[in-house]
Image (cartoon, rainbow, N blue to C red):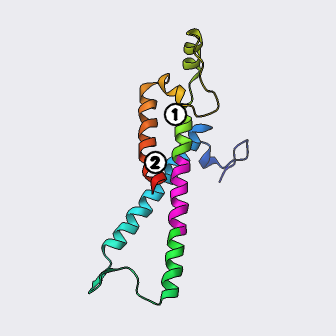
């Protein structure tokens, strides 16, 4: 693989830079978690059925306890990845553009720069505001559960 002047691999040189790369990686991470969740749901849906109902695992208690602990660790890691991705995207969406900062300064209105502030939501473009609210609402079940 050919290297560019900065030493990065050529296949990554066409990727976006800065916060856009972070958003892309966050989107890929969240998509991977979605695919894993769908696969786990499919496995559970086709699990065997006996007189006790649906059975995912039959074995001794120690093995079941270890399996349960491992599954919960994986669930927590995946949930943390999705929440981190959502939080990063929300921070990027709530950051005002240079034009928005200039327009607010003309009106003598201040904005938060470098931190996620709810105050900015009323001054940024409506499409970014809508995406911010959708991410917030979709992340709420993760926080509660």
* Prevailing SS of the magenta stretch: helix
Q: Is residue 101 left or right of residue 34?
A: right
Q: Where does the C terminus fall, quadrant-wise?
A: bottom left
The answer to whether residue 112 of the structure is visible from this angle is yes
Secondary element under disc 1, as helix, strand or loop, is helix
Q: Where residue 116 sits: x, y (%)?
A: 58, 34
In the image, residue 70 lies at what x, y percent? 54, 74
First in residue order: circle 2 vs circle 1: 1
Residue lying at the far right in this picture: please name it: 6
Q: Using the image, determine if residue 33 lies above or below residue 72.
A: above
Magenta region: 73-85
* Residue pictured at 57% horizontal, 30% vertical: 95
How many numbered marks does the figure carry? Answer: 2
Which marked residue is nearer to the observer: mark 2 or mark 1?
A: 2
The picture places residue 81, in percent across and down from the top left corner, at 54, 55
Determine the residue located farthest toward the front in the rendered image. 144
Give the residue drawn at x 52%, y 34%.
93
């Amino acid at each position: 693989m050919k290297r560019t002047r900065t030493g990065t691999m050529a296949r990554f040189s066409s990727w976006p830079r800065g916060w856009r790369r972070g958003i892309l990686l966050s989107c890929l991470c969240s998509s991977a978690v979605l695919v894993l969740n769908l696969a786990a749901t499919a496995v559970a849906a086709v699990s065997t059925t006996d007189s006790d109902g649906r059975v995912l695992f039959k074995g001794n208690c120690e093995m079941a306890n270890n399996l349960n602990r491992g599954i919960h660790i994986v669930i927590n890691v995946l949930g943390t990845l999705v929440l981190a991705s959502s939080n990063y995207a929300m921070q990027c969406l709530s950051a005002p553009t240079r034009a928005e900062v200039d327009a607010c300064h003309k009106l003598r209105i201040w904005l938060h720069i470098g931190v996620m502030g709810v105050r900015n939501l009323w001054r940024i473009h409506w499409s970014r505001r809508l995406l911010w609210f959708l991410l917030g609402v979709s992340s709420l079940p993760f926080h509660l559960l």
